[in-house]
Image (spheres, rainbow, N blue to C red):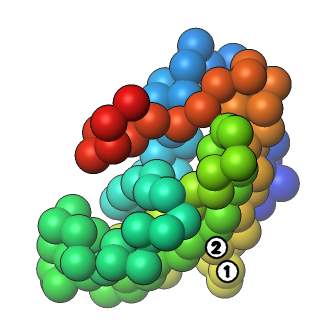
Amino acid sequence: MKERYLLDEISRRVREAAGFADALESIRLLLEEEAGRAILLVRFAKTAGSHLREKPIADLLESREFPVRSVYTSRFDAGGDRKAVLIGCFGSWGASGDMLERATAHAAAQLGAFLARTNREVFLDNEAA
């Protein structure tokens, strides 16, 4: 898949999403088509440092299913004065160059724009809303 198409498709999917969770899942499915396996997690910036220990990420990084395994992070505004981090973990057979890193950064920017456009905030499962 061409990088420009991938980035444009991320933007389109976020624009057309009914909600934040829908946008995140749609992006994950798209990136999984490109990479082979994709895990996308959103954590608040203050807690994102321990993401490598999270079970889905640790399991993928330790697996031998894919010869290339990578993790990328990108910060974005989570609404209010809070910052969040999009964590992208990928298993692939060799995705081209640093395309997945740029796609993760672009997805984070689009998710932040979605929250700003809809005047919403991210509430995570492990946080009391």
**Residue at 69% across / 39% down in the picture?**
80
Secondary structure category for the residue under label 1:
loop
- Disc 2 residue type (three-letter): Glu
Q: Amino acid at mark 1?
A: Asp
In the image, is residue 55 above or below residue 106?
Answer: below
The answer to which image quadrant residue 47 occupies is: bottom left
Is 51 left, or right, of 23 in this rendering? left
How many neighbours does mark 2 have within 10 angstroms: few (below 14), some (14-19), or many (20 or more)?
Answer: some
Decide: is 52 above or below 42.
below
| Residue at 39 percent of width and 84 percent of height | 68
Residue 35 picture location, percent across and down: 46, 63
Toward which corner of the image does residue 63 lie, by quadrant? Answer: bottom left
- Badge 1: how crowded within 10 Å, few (<14), some, or many (20+)? few
- Residue 101's x, y, as percent? 64, 73
Tell which tag, 1 or 2, sits nearer the viewer. Answer: 2
**Could you say where residue 28 lies in the image, as x and y percent from the top left?**
46, 45
Q: Is residue 86 visible?
A: no
What residue is disc 1 on? 98
Q: Please identify the quadrant where the N terminus is shown.
A: bottom right
Q: Which mark is residue 101?
A: 2
The outermost residue toward the top is 18
